Image: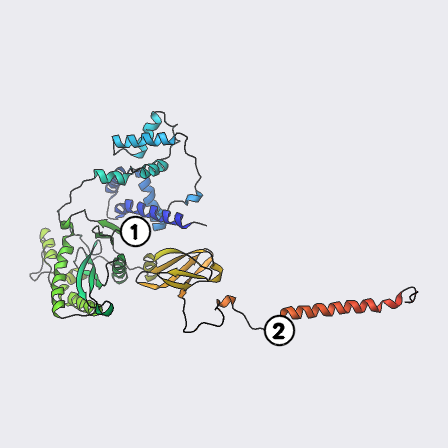
Amino acid sequence: MQTTENKQWQDEQALNRYQLIAPLLDETLDNAKRIQMREDIAGKNGISPRSLYRYEAAYRNGGFAGLKPMNREQRRSQKLLENFDEILEQAIQLKKEVPKRSVKQIIYILELEGWAAPGILKRSTMERYLYKAGFGVRQMQMYNDARKSSSKRFCKPHRMMLLQGDIKYGLKLPIGKNGAMVQTYLSSAIDDHSRYVLQSSFYDNQEEAIVEDTFRKVILKHGKFDACYFDHGSQYVAKQLKFSLSRLGITIRTAPVRSGKSKGKVEKFHQVVDSFLREAKVHKIKTLEELNRYWEIYLEEYYHKTPHDGIREYYESMNSPIPAAGITPLQEWGRDTRHLTFLDASVVAEAFLHHEERLVDKGACISFRGHKYETKPSLIGCRVEISYDPMVPETITVRYPGMEPFTAEPVKIGPFCDKAPSLPVSMQEQETESSRMLAALEKKHVQTRQQRADAISFGKYRKDGGRHV
């Protein structure tokens, strides 16, 4: 059976491979441009263009699952060379001398110098040990990559090609315990081309779950988008969000560090949010539901129907005619010729589920967020995988190899204890018409009596006539 550690490793490798090939999956690229980009990506990440080509083919044939590497347990184990520590030391020295040296080049030099016979050292093994030593490609890039942020403006030509997301502080509302004031946060997703707000809601926290909820609603309401653009906030670099969007074939791009200009559309939108918050404060809004209701009205009746300067500037830069009254986000969204691509709701729901592992205790229960949930007696002592929606954590699905997934129910504690501890239905005592043990004993007793009767009946046939001397 595949272990959870191996599964997590496969998912991480698949996610890393997807992030490498994501720019190459753009269908608008011509073959020459794709080859050039493939070589650039290969050079920056220390892998061969051939490997990137294999990853692309695997993704097109099998989707995200096709990028998962072979199970570690299925791989043939190979012992390291006796002098591998010395070889690794030389490899680190070669990396220090020329940080951009690829692993392939390092192995080639080591073979030329006689540290190992040709073909013995494997690239994957050397990459892994260099990474552990702090000399991986991404680690070295942290020391050498000092790209300056670009102030050049950009705008995608069609809707749903790029979405921008961000979180902003909202009002403080008396929604805490005993009316305590609680800070609210606005999570939004904006279409880069039309400036249309696809999803925007206030929450009472700023956990990563609110970002997942925002983009899940975007996909369910408006369909799949090509890519999203975030800053380096912890909610946007979370592994779960990357995993969920990657499973749906959506690319994540991050803005350069300390580059506010690259997030100009979001910053401009936040000015609209500020104007709403001033009105909401005067209106003396008290609940989160009321705040979201008025915010939705504000977006639909004011923001979406007001001509946007950014849209006008975009068409002016292209020397395209625009109406004298300007173009609103709602108009620009509606007149776009690009079709929307909707996904099955079950596919979207599965992509955004969180997965964890739990041990089933001797009462056939698992613990989750301080509560107990009932599973099945046959799983006692087993480690099971649970999946749940972070916005509805009360519903937990339990999975175990060889068993159909099922929903775990919360353990219910009544006002009085039972006369006897309650057992699962499959283990409870069942009423019967008779005792199978007594019936079996009665049958055996009849057979025993019959055997005795037969022995007595044959006694008269003895040669001495049955007399005793």
Residue at 32% x, 28% y is: 109
Q: Can I make out residue 446 in this image?
A: yes
Tell me the tag on residue 92. Answer: none
To which residue does mark 1 refer? 239
What's the residue type where badge 1 is placed?
Lys
Give the quadrant of residue 181: bottom left
Label located before the other in sequence (1 or 2): 1
- Looking at the image, residue 307 lies above or below residue 314: below
Q: CA distance from mark 1 to mark 2?
A: 60 Å
**Residue 121 x/y as whole percent:** 38, 32
What's the residue type where badge 2 is placed?
Ser
Give the quadrant of residue 142: top left
Q: Can I make out residue 335 in this image?
A: no
**Secondary element at image label 2:** loop
Give the quadrant of residue 274: bottom left
- Looking at the image, residue 18 lies above or below residue 387: above
**Residue 93 x/y as whole percent:** 29, 30
Q: Residues within 10 Å of mark 1 (few under 14, many from 20)?
A: few
**Residue 88 x/y as whole percent:** 34, 32
Tell me whether the residue at label 1 lies in contact with that at label 2, contact meaning CB atoms closer than 8 angstroms: no
Residue at 32% x, 33% y is: 104
Q: Residues within 10 Å of mark 2 (few under 14, many from 20)?
A: few
**Secondary element at image label 1:** helix
Quarter of the picture holding the C terminus: bottom right
To which residue does mark 2 refer? 434
Judged from this view, the residue extending furthest toward the left is 324
**Residue 190 x/y as whole percent:** 19, 58
